[in-house]
Image (spheres, grey):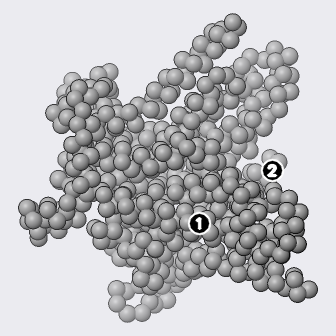
Amino acid sequence: MKRYSSNWYWFYVINYSLVIIIIFPIYWTFISSIKQPSELNGNPTFYPKTITLEYYDRIWNFDRQERLEDTDAKDLDTYLRGTGIKRPFINSAIVSIGTILVTIVVCTLAAYSLSILKTPLKNFIFMLMILPILIPGISLIIPLYKLMRELNLVDTHFGLVFLHSTAMLPLGIFMMRNAFMSIPSTLREVAMLEGSSELKIIFNVMLPLAVPGLLTVAVFAMYVSWNDYIYAFLFINKPENTMLNLALKQLAISDNQFGLKWGDLTAGSVVSFIPIIIFYGFLQKYFVRGVTGSAVKE
Amino acid sequence: MTRLRKEQTVGLLMVLPALLLLTVFFLYPLGNSFWMSFHKWPLFGKPKWVGLDNYIYMFQDERFWESLKFTFVYTLTVTPMLFIVALGTALLCNSKAWGTTFFRSIYFLPVVMSFATASYVWLWLYSEMYGVIIFALEFFGFGGEKKNLNVWKTGTSSMWAVNAMVTWKFSGIQMIILIAGLQAIRDDFYEASKLMGASLWQTIWHVTLPLLRPSIALALILSIAGSIQAYEQFVIMTRGGPSNSTKTLVMHTVDMGFDYFKLGPAAALGVIIMIILFVLTVVQLRLFRKNY
């Protein structure tokens, strides 16, 4: 009975108020995206009177070609801005999945080599790998742009995958190295006596025991890649290669620069939030560990 | 001996892909950014060594000082906002009461939303015509009789509007860091302060906060480093306006490099940002070492 003393009362009052404040912008965006246009462009209402999926239909299936035919094709602005988000969504998904795969393979191999094996110079190499934490990519955009041009990686998915994976190296290697080092070395020795190769040992012995680390790295790779804005802005020019975060901007300003289309924009925001919220729902623990782990150093 | 040799070769082969990525997409651009900052980059033809000219050009540019000043003002205002909310929620969620896991996962929720999406969402909330925040503010009497409140009208109000969004978006990360720190504090300290008859606030002030110092340092420096790199929140929400009053250092770099094609000064700007961030991180590591 003592649990519900006045202190606890305030504990729940404050917490629930905060929950409402935190959730509200997300709730508001969601209901805005399913309101009828007449209701959306009026005094705010706290729940939709009638529900419509019109905005979702429009932003997802918007056909640039169709638009080009019924408006002035020479109007480059319309051409650039009038992109639906199906293609950008797929582009972002490809880059995110690519980043997850490249990160996992590269970081697992490197971390294994830098923790278990007797690789020469391994402490020095590890320090190098951690270095990008001290110098974020955002301060290197100018030389990176030059590099991307020289390597013909502008306007490619590969270019972004490489950049995002490089950004993932410190955390990825750090996490996987910790995961491997916590596995007793006798397991590897036994497998070696049975004549297994290193790759076999990684796959059959080590990785099954390093699943939490692996999930953390995968989830954070998805987070980094899905959230990227500046690389996608600088290194992607063609409309058909646009990433989701930038397509949202083009959606928003497709009529004219200052009259934003709120229904389209809120629907687009919800679509961009869905994949990440699914990840968060299922892998919350690893998400929190990954996002905060990027901050916690040795 | 041969077995060791083999293991060394295998190890090098395994670390090779990571080294390759690091060298091509980090170490080479890192070196190149210094090299580029000492050269003049004409649109056509070869780059020319110009010494410190790019730096001098940049330092004489008023826009650089304006963006530097704005970036610092933004950093100094958003950091306390983030920290206070994070500390409050961390203290609230550190108990073993029913529901704390739920509360924590809700407070962390905005962190997982992409920064760009969060900016669009809040742009809608701030919308001059039908935005719910504007509606609420006008309901409480802000904006005067005419009800023509517009948060994007001045640089200062724009910055606070963005600060509110960033606080909503990122306090979850700091909360988790602070909770980790709180959980490392042993119960004896609290018991001792209880025995001495300390009030809740006295306990927080004299026991919790001093013991939390390493986590606080980490949380603060993280948010400072993040704010120095501020870009998309301002590109999306204010577009640097009104009249360039909310232009950040990174925005200025992008303008320099990609709008005016002044690659040399832009590279020099990158080096400056790098140095600021590097110094901050070294300070952070120092603070850490001292406390352990």
Residue under label 1, please give it: A103
Residue B276 image point, x, y percent:
58, 62
* Quarter of image, res A241: bottom left
Q: Residues within 10 Å of mark 1 (few under 14, many from 20)?
A: many
Residue B139 image point, x, y percent:
29, 22
Q: Residue furthest top?
A: A1
Residue under label 2, please give it: B290
Kind of residue sitting beneath label 1? Thr
Of residues B272 and B89, the one drawn nearer to the viewer in this rendering: B89
Q: With B12 as the anchor, is B271 left or right in this view? A: left
Q: Secondary structure at mark 2?
A: helix
- Residue at mark 2: chain: B
Of residues A176 and A210, the one drawn nearer to the viewer in this rendering: A210
- Disc 2 + disc 1, Cβ < 8 Å: no
Residue B245 image point, x, y percent:
36, 52
Residue A145 image point, x, y percent:
44, 76
Q: Residue at x 9, y 65 (%)?
A: A69
- Residue at mark 1: chain: A
Q: Residue at x 23, y 26 (%)?
A: A49
